[in-house]
Amino acid sequence: MTTVDTQEILTLPVDNVLSQLNTAQAGLSTQEVQLRISTYGPNELAEKQKRTGLIEILYHLRNPLVIILLIAGLISGFVQDVTDAVIIFLIVLLSITLDVYQESKAQNAAEALKDKVTTKATVLRDGVKQDVKLSEIVPGDIIYLIAGDLVPADSRLISAKDLNLNQSALTGEAFPVEKNAAPLAAVTSEMTGWNNYVFLGTSVVSGTGTAVVVNTGKLTEYGKIAKALVAKAPETEFEKGLRRFGALMTEVTLFLVVFVFFVNAFFYSGSRTILQSLLFAVALAVGLTPELLPMIMSINLSRGAVAMSKKGVIVKRLASIQNFGNMDVLCTDKTGTLTENKLTLNGTEDLEGKEAQKVLTYGYFNCVFETGLKSPLDDAVLQYKQFDVAGITKIDEIPFDFIRRRVSVVVENEGQRLIISKGAPEEILKICVFCETDEILTDFTNVCQGKFEQRYNALSAQGFRVLAVAYKKVKADKTHYSIGDETDMVFLGFLSFFDPPKESAKEAIRLLARDGVELKVVTGDNELVTKTVCDQLGFTIKGVITGSQIAMLQDDALARVVEDNNIFARVNPAQKDRVITALKANGHVVGYMGDGINDAPSLKTADVGISVENAVDVAKESADLILLKPDLIVLDQGVLEGRKTFGNTMKYIMMGVSSNFGTMFSVAGASLFLSFLPMTAIQILLNNLLYDLSEATIPTDNVDAEYIEKPKKLDISYIRRFMVTMGPVSSVFDFLTFFLLIVVFRASIPVFQTAWFIESLTTQTLVVFLLRTRKTPFYKSKPGKLLVISSLSVVAVAFALPYTPLGAVFKFSPPPATFYLALVGLIAAYLLLVEVVKKWFLKRYACLLEQIYVPKKQN
């Protein structure tokens, strides 16, 4: 892979830069792009290694238990039974192939949905502008940048107009940095001085620019320091629970397997070899560990993603679906969520409350000349009335940022130069020392301060959003202006805007509350206008706190405050982050919904980042989920789909800790008094394969409406109690089967093994219909058709196998007909007892069940 000297690129004229990168102003050709992609690779910080075919199968073989089993089977083939060894290999291969196929199919479905909201960059290729995926950008590409864009790769600017970038993620600079296309006279090692260079991962705050790509992917400055950060996404709350569940099952399984192996190897060494004992124990472990869980998860998540896409929610990160369903707090701005985000200019007024034409004129000049991302407020001013700006020249711009919360433009008209500022009234107030009413200029006195607060509060209390406008005359002695020039300004007056409440918002708030999701409004607007909108929508206000109050609180105090308040007004991005972090620390699963440049940090901090399709690139890239329209009803429907996904995953987990654990316990007990193996290794593996086939349809199962009413969490202590309660129920009937086979039917070893194969597979397959619901099965909760078909098919195969040629291969011997009569009675009694114990368990641990679904609160 060839590289260029970045520091040399910084000092060269544009023509020389293009020449060195072997490109031109017209961009690269399609053929050249393909060549460069093969040379430099995709524009990704960490290339995704997509495993296919044999590589994917080998990846699934990484399980140590499977490796031990294959080695033991290989040894068995050399010293004992070649047929058994071949069967072991075939069953393991078939089982893994099933996993690979299902996971691959699920992942492909999810990726197809994700492509719908992939962030793209505008490039010039073959002399034509076109949008391409960020991963397809190559060195030499000519790219275009506008406000709201993510910079797709490290690039040298060709041209720039009022271009300001937020590069705090890379350099730590708090304020936007202005960029230009001029070559640097000298280059330092500090990237903060590279004013003609833009970096991957930074975002455009204002202005426009054209640049040529210098480095992509891991060769970018961000790529050099971020490899560890992008290698693996942080664990979701549900993934942490799964990891703890896996550890629990592994500990229990290994303990019992070691016990079974030593009992069989040393107490019955005369009737079986150590190799047979090892094969049996390891096959048992492979069959009873939750190895199917990754496949169930993949199918569940992909089906959830497809279902959510039909509801208008596109999933970018599959793992986030579980958190989405478990979300119990949603933080969102009011604009576009509770309101229509269709603003109209209500009017203008000065400090006396009179209409002020100059406020509108100067506000219009500010809106028309600023090059940052236009807000609906700007659009409302520009649409209200148009002014002739032909004779006005823009000199410079001081872009908006979320600390100052204002934007200034410097313009010149008929030899007079002005700085015109527009922004949040309280921030404009900070830079004003004069005020103007009816063209009369006076000092901004305490009387003016009182009038300011009175008019501002009055407009806000009526539900109007408010901006303030100020100006000052300056000398024409320079061309570049900065924040330091925003002083000694003249306050002109207010622009007031009306943003009507969204018609669907009242119903959406009701639905979210019904489904256990608490809504918290986190906004930059002031508290008065926010309260008015919330009152209009019937939103119950618990308490209101402002950004200035949050700034005074320590983290422990904030942890209590976030529980007692549900409106957070006048907050900046850093304070939004603190609110979200405090809620997470209190045990909540927190969602955050945002679409602006300032929302990106909060989207990453939240458990679930939610954005909308028309959001800026930097917000969409930070989000886990994209709503196709900014509607809370759509979001609520997505939450319910996420809970269905969680519910079906929990069904498999509960199956794994009940019947499977019971079977393991039965084998451990049988090892103490049986002089032979209750099932051979190949029979156990076949049992496991058939059981896997029946369980593979769990993701298609119906989920009870009551189950998705409230958010839930995966709690290991609850699962452990369920395991030690339900597992022994299965073992009781296993031991009863053993007793009948030995004492009543006096079964030979092959008949015993066959009979227990049928009994264990049938009971653990059918019990899913009881454990899948808290209700009475079939009568009050109907299972999915595919689950019924797969389960009954596997039971039919279990009954038929001993009578087929394949049965002889697995050393099955048909039990007597009377055994089947006894088996029907055993199965009926087992299912009845499981239902009774299930009802008792749910009643006994009802309080615990509710507690694990409710986050801890701060006192």
Image: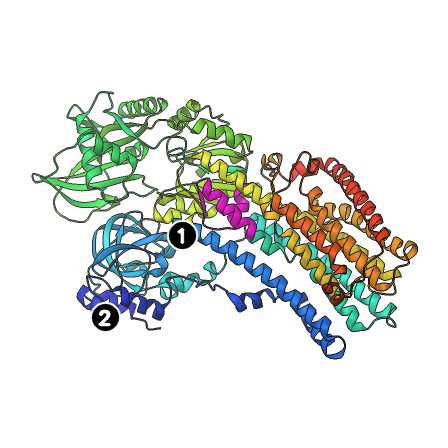
Task: Report the amino acid beneath label 1.
Answer: Asp
352 relative position to 538: left or right: left
Magenta-drawn stretch, dominant element (helix, strand or loop): helix
Q: CA distance from mark 2 to mark 1?
A: 34 Å
Local secondary structure at mark 1: helix
Look at the image and tell me whether residue 289 can be seen.
no
Q: Could you classify mark 2 by the number of other residues whose Cα lies within 10 Å: few (under 14), some (14-19), or many (20 or more)? A: some
Of residues 416 and 284, the one nearer the viewer is 284
3 relative position to 291: left or right: left
Q: Is residue 323 shown in magenta?
A: yes
Closer mark to the observer between disc 2 and disc 1: 1
Residue 326 figure quarter: top right
Residue at x 52%, y 37% (from the top left corner): 329
557, above or below 758, in the image = above
Label placed on residue 69: none
Label placed on residue 20: 2
- Name the residue beneath numbered marker 1: 115
67, above or below 496, in the image = below
Look at the image and tell me whether residue 451 can be seen.
yes
Residue 132 figure quarter: bottom left
Residue 847 figure quarter: top right
**Residue range highlighted in magenta:** 299-327
Q: Residue 81, image x and y in percent?
A: 75, 75
